[in-house]
Image (cartoon, helix red, strand yellow):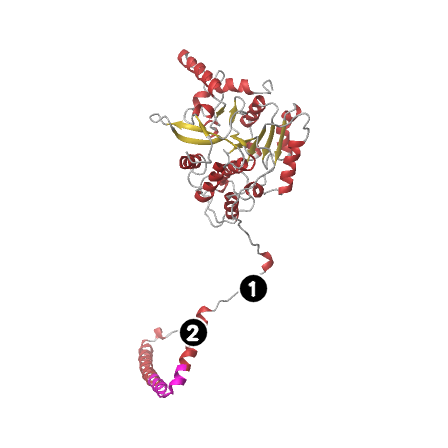
Amino acid sequence: MFSLYHFPFLSQNFSSLMEDYIKHNHHHFHKLKKALFSILFILPTPFLALLILFLLAYNAFSIFSIHIPHHDHSSHKHLLHPPPSHTKTNLSSSVFFAVKEEYSSPIINKINIHKFKRHNKHKHGLNTLPSETSFSLFEKRLDAFFTSNSSSSSCDVRFFMTWISPLKAFGEREFLSIESLFKSHPKACLVIVSKSMDSEKGAQILRPFVKNGFRVIAIEPDFNYLFKNTHAETWFNRLKQGNVNPGGISLGQNLSNLLRLSLLYKFGGIYIDADVMILKSFSNLRNTIGAQNIDVKTKKWSRLNNAVLIFDKNHPLLWKFIEEFALTFDGNKWGHNGPYLISRVVSRVSGREGFNFSIVPPSAFYPVDWRGIKSLFKGPKDEVHSKWLVKKMKQIREESFALHLWNRQSRNLKVVKGSIVDNIILSCCIFCNT
C-alpha cells in the first residue's frame, strides 16, 4: 500500500492541479447562476408567480408532513379519569381502622417506575406490590363476614386493620395490638385489609383468636374500589402509569397514609396504627383527631397526628385530606403526606361551617411523643425513677384511650420487667400465659 505522502513531488503537483480545477469550475458555476437569473427575469410574470407558489407549497408540505408508523392498536388501552364526586355506601358507619406503616410493603403490581431513578428499590416497596382484587369479591367477602353469625355477634363495633407490609414483618407487637383491641372490645369484629395476611400463613397467625371466639378475618384490598370517585382515584391511576414520582420515602408508607383516609371516607369509624395499644373503649369518640404536641405559650396544638383518626363516613374533612394528598403529594419529604398533611388542612378549615370535629390533647393517644418513648420501656433504676414510673402509669390509665408505641423509634427496644410498657402488656393481653 502507498499514498501520495510517500512521493512529495507528486503530492505538490496534485495539490496545484486541484486548486486550478476548483477555480475553473467556480468560474463556470458563477456563469451558470447568472444565466439562470437572466432567464427568470425574462419569464412572464404569471408564469413566474405560479412557479414561486409551487415551490412554497412543496416546502410547506415537506415541513408539516408527519410519518405515522403502523401500530397494533389492539395493544393500546384508553384510561379515563372521571372527576371526583361523593358516593355513599350501605356499610355501617361504626367502623374501626388500624394501619401498620413502618415497613416498605407490597401494594401495586403494575407501576411504571422507569421514568424515575431509584436509589434503593427495596426501600420504596415497588418490586412486590400487590394487585387489586375484584370489587365483587372484596365487597362480598366483607359483607358476608359482617352478616354471618349475626345471632351470636352483631358486630356493632367494627375494626379494620390494614396490613400493607410483608407477612414476616407481622410480629409480637402487632399480635399484642390485636389482643388489646379484643380486650377492650370483646364483641368487636376485626377485618385485616391485607394481601399478605390474606393467605394460609396469615390464617395461622390469626387462628388463636378464631379458636377463642373472636371474630377476625383478613381480606386482600381492592384499591380501585376504595379510591373510586375521590381524588385518590386519579392520583392512583397516574401513579400506575408512571406519571407520579414516588420519591425517596417508602411508597408503602405514603400509600398507607392515603388508604386510611379512603377507608374512613368510604365506611366511617376509627383508624389506628397497628403499633397502638388500646387501653379503653373508643365507643364514645366521634369525629376526633389527636394532637401530638401542644405549644407551651399559646396552649394550642402545634402538630396533629394521623395514627388515630375517628370520623363518620363521607365527612367533608376527609374529602379535603384526600384532595390535599392528591394535589400536593411529595414522596421526598417524610410526614408531608401524613401528619403534616393533617395539620395543614385542619389549620385552614378550622372554624368553617360544615367541618365539625374535635381535637383531643396529646394525653389521649400520644401520652409520650417519639422522643420520649424509650422511657416507657425502661424498668425502675432507683427510688426516684420508680416513683416517676408509678405516677406516669397512673396518668396514662386515667387520661389515655391508647398508647402509640412509635414503632420507628422503639421496634428494637426490649421490654424491661417493671416498665410501663410491661405493665400495659400484662393488662391488655389475652394469651398472657402462652
Using the rendered image of the protein, determine whether residue 250 is visible from the camera's viewpoint: no
357 on left or right of 76: left
Query: What residue does disc 2 label?
Result: 59
Residue 104 spot, x, y in % from top left: 51, 37
Using the rendered image of the protein, determine whether residue 76 is visible from the camera's viewpoint: yes
Q: Nearer the viewer, residue 253 or 397?
A: 397
Amino acid beneath label 1? His
Residue situated furthest front in the rendering? 353
Q: Which residues are magenta?
A: 33-49
Question: Magenta segment: does it hold 431?
Answer: no
Q: Secondary structure beneath disc 2?
A: helix
Q: Secondary structure beneath disc 1?
A: loop
Residue 241 spot, x, y in % from top left: 52, 49
Judge whether 227 appears above or below 73 on screen. above
Amino acid beneath label 2? Asn
Dominant secondary structure (helix, strand or loop) of the stretch shown in magenta:
helix
Q: Are marks 1 and 2 in contact (CB under 8 Å)?
A: no
Residue 179 spot, x, y in % from top left: 57, 24
Q: Quadrant of residue 60?
A: bottom left
- Near mark 1 (Cα within 10 A), the count class, few <14, some 14-19 or many ≥20, is few
Query: What residue does disc 1 label?
Result: 70
Residue 88 spot, x, y in % from top left: 57, 39
Where does the C terminus fall, quadrant-wise? top right
Q: CA distance from mark 1 to mark 2?
A: 26 Å
